[in-house]
Image: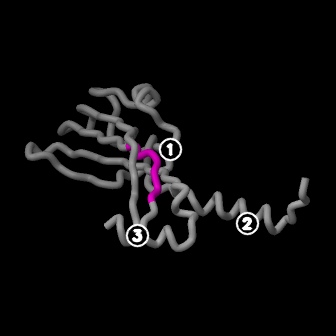
Amino acid sequence: MKYRTPAYSLFILALAISGCASVGNETLRAETETSVQGKLVEGKTTKSETKALFGTALKTAFTDGGLEMWTYEFSKVSADVVSFIPIVNLFGATASGKKKELVVLFDSTGVIKRYAMSESDVTQKTGIFNN
């Protein structure tokens, strides 16, 4: 077995780390639909309790009826193998992973009326041929 230098090991570690990225609300990282069900209760949980659990929402909007809606998002993607091939990755590379989204609708008194948690696969494409 060949001896590998510490510099080689650091290079491999840096390559592995640089291939991953996460964006959004970190509190959603470990959440699932089931875990959110244990924290949010329709007709009971308030805006301030929701904010204490998940922080400030990424987006705030209002329905036509004037109800407030908060949206939280978290995405984690990793570069696919082709992204590490020099020159080739300029023409087309991809990163794939998971996106989590929590949407909370509050009634006129500031209590949760409805909410939905979803998790979906995402793919991000870059390069000349992926535009």
Query: Mark number for residue 11?
Result: 2
Q: Earlier in the sequence, mark 3 or mark 2?
A: 2
Q: What is the CA distance from the residue labelled 2 to the residue labelled 1?
A: 27 Å
Image x and y of residue 104, in percent: 29, 40
Q: Residue at x 31, y 67 (%)?
A: 131
Asked if the residue at tag 3 contacts the one at tag 1, i.e. Cβ–Cβ closer than 8 Å, the answer is no
Please name the amino acid that badge 2 sits on: Phe
**Disc 3 on helix, strand or loop?**
loop
| Residue 96 counted in the magenta span | yes
Q: What is the CA distance from the residue labelled 1 to the residue labelled 3?
A: 28 Å
Instruction: Write down the residue under mark 3.
Output: 127
Q: Which sits in the foreground, 55 or 85? A: 85
Image x and y of residue 14, in percent: 68, 64
Magenta-drawn segment: 94-100
Q: Residue at x 71, y 60 (%)?
A: 13
Query: Mark number for residue 29?
Result: 1
Image x and y of residue 71, in percent: 31, 47
Q: Main secondary structure of the magenta part?
A: strand
| Residue 33 counted in the magenta span | no
In the displayed structure, 31 sits above or below 96; it is: above
Please name the amino acid that badge 3 sits on: Gly
Q: Earlier in the sequence, mark 1 or mark 3?
A: 1
Q: Nearer the viewer, mark 3 or mark 2?
A: 3
**Disc 2 on helix, strand or loop?**
helix
Please name the amino acid that badge 1 sits on: Arg
